[in-house]
Amino acid sequence: MGWPKEDRIRWVEWRLKERIAKESGRYADRDLSAEGVPDRISLEVWLAKERDGLSWQQIVIKYFPQYVGRRQKSAGMSKARRVHGLVKAVLSPTEERDRLEHAHQIIRYEFYDRLRNYSPCRSRSLAR
């Protein structure tokens, strides 16, 4: 189903604060990239669209000024949509990600079950 919009906005705001703190050297406890947290610009673009209600064109002007021009406007809007999609993907896990997580759980349980039932004496007797 997904989180309510206010919760998604709050989550992105907190991740943005953590990114800013990490970039300024005040926060180094966690590796945000390893945890799958998108980069700062992606978080800012997502908030501009979802919280502030900016249009794609306004987002390009504000965050990607290198694309402001007649011939590059559509490329800038595509870029803005892509970085917005990065955050959207993190916020709404897909069925594929859920299936993979479930498969990893099954593998872990089977591994620990086999490990728990492993007996060195049993394997030695089979080797004879």
Image: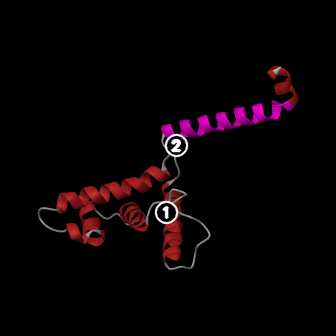
Which quarter of the image is occupied by the C terminus?
top right
The residue type indicated by label 1 comes to: Val
Q: Taking 26 as reference, is 86 left or right?
A: left
Q: Taking 41 as reference, is 58 left or right?
A: left
x and y percentages locating residue 95 in the rendered image: 50, 37
| Residue 66 image label | none
**Residue 114 within the magenta-colored segment of the rendering:** yes
Q: Which image quarter: residue 66?
A: bottom left
* Circle 1 residues within 10 Å: few <14, some 14–19, many ≥20: many
Is 2 situated above or below 24?
A: above
The residue sitting at 50% across, 70% down in the picture is 19
Q: Nearer the viewer, residue 49 or 64?
A: 64
Q: Secondary structure at mark 1?
A: helix
Is 38 situated above or below 107?
A: below
Q: Nearer the viewer, residue 92 or 35?
A: 35
* Circle 2 residues within 10 Å: few <14, some 14–19, many ≥20: few
Question: Which residue is disc 1 drawn over?
Answer: 12
Specify the segment rendered in magenta.
95-120
The outermost residue toward the right is 121
Q: Report the predominant secondary structure element of the magenta stretch.
A: helix
Question: Which residue is disc 2 drawn over?
Answer: 1
x and y percentages locating residue 35 in the rendered image: 55, 57
x and y percentages locating residue 64 in the rendered image: 27, 68
Is 59 situated above or below 93?
A: below
Q: Which image quarter: residue 122?
A: top right
The residue type indicated by label 2 comes to: Met
